[in-house]
C-alpha cells in the first residue's frame, strides 16, 4: 500500500541524482564522511562477506582482507554486523558503502567465486 508523500521523502539524495554518477565507486566516495571498517579472514576456509542493504557478496580467502567504507550520514553507528560460521553480514546504515583492497582499489562483488559456490 502506498502512503501519500512517502515516495517523495525516500528519493535519492545527491550525488545519486541522475547525471551525477549513480552508485559508482567514485560517486559514493564523493559523498564524503568516510568511515572505514577492516574485514579480515583469519580463518582457514573461505569467508563470505555480505554487504547490505544491496545484497552484494564477496568471498575472502584465508589471510585476505578488505576495507568496507560507509559514506554519507547515519543515525548512531555507521555499521551493524552479524557473524555466523564462515560468514559476516555488514549493514552500512547510511545505505552507501564501498569495498576496497589494501591499495584503495574497488573490489567488485561476486569476485573470484570458486566453481560450485553459489552458482
Image (spheres, grey):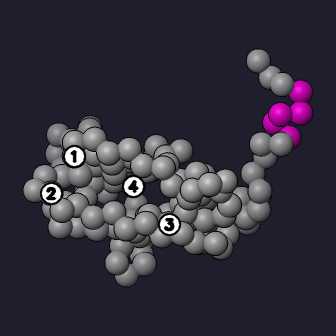
Question: Disc 2, disc 1: CB below 8 Å?
Answer: yes
Q: Which numbered tag is attached to residue 43?
A: 2
Whole-number angstrom distance, CA of label 1 to CA of label 4: 17 Å
Q: Report the mark closest to the observer, 1 or 4.
A: 1
Query: Which of 19/91 is in front?
Result: 91
Whole-number angstrom distance, CA of label 1 to CA of label 3: 21 Å
Q: Who comes first in sequence, dot 1 or dot 3? A: 3
Is residue 11 visible in the rendered image? The answer is yes
For the residue labelled by badge 4, is the local secondary structure a helix, a strand or a loop?
loop
Q: Assess disc 4: are there few (<14), some (14-19) or many (≥20) residues with their C-alpha within 10 Å of its C-alpha.
A: some
Describe residue 32's horizontal placement relative to residue 19 as left or right: left
Q: Which residue is mark 4?
A: 109
Q: Position of residue 110 (x, y in %)?
A: 34, 51
Q: Is residue 7 magenta?
A: yes
- The correct choice, above or below, for 118 with respect to 37 in the image is above
Predominant SS along the magenta part: helix
Q: Who comes first in sequence, dot 3 or dot 4? A: 3
Q: Which residue is mark 3?
A: 69
Residue lying farthest to the front in this orientation = 76
Q: Who comes first in sequence, dot 1 or dot 4? A: 1
Q: Which residue is mark 1?
A: 86
Amino acid at each position: 500500500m502506498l502512503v501519500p508523500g512517502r515516495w517523495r521523502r525516500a528519493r535519492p539524495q545527491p550525488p545519486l541524482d541522475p547525471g551525477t554518477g549513480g552508485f559508482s565507486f567514485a560517486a559514493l566516495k564523493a559523498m564524503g564522511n568516510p568511515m572505514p571498517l577492516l574485514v579480515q579472514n583469519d580463518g582457514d576456509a573461505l569467508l563470505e562477506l555480505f554487504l547490505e542493504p544491496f545484497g552484494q557478496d564477496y568471498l575472502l580467502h584465508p589471510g585476505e582482507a578488505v576495507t568496507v567504507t560507509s559514506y554519507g550520514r547515519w543515525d548512531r553507528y555507521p555499521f551493524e554486523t552479524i557473524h555466523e560460521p564462515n560468514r559476516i553480514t555488514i549493514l552500512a546504515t547510511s545505505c552507501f558503502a564501498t569495498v576496497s583492497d589494501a591499495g584503495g582499489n574497488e573490489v567488485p562483488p561476486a569476485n573470484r567465486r570458486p566453481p560450485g559456490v553459489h552458482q
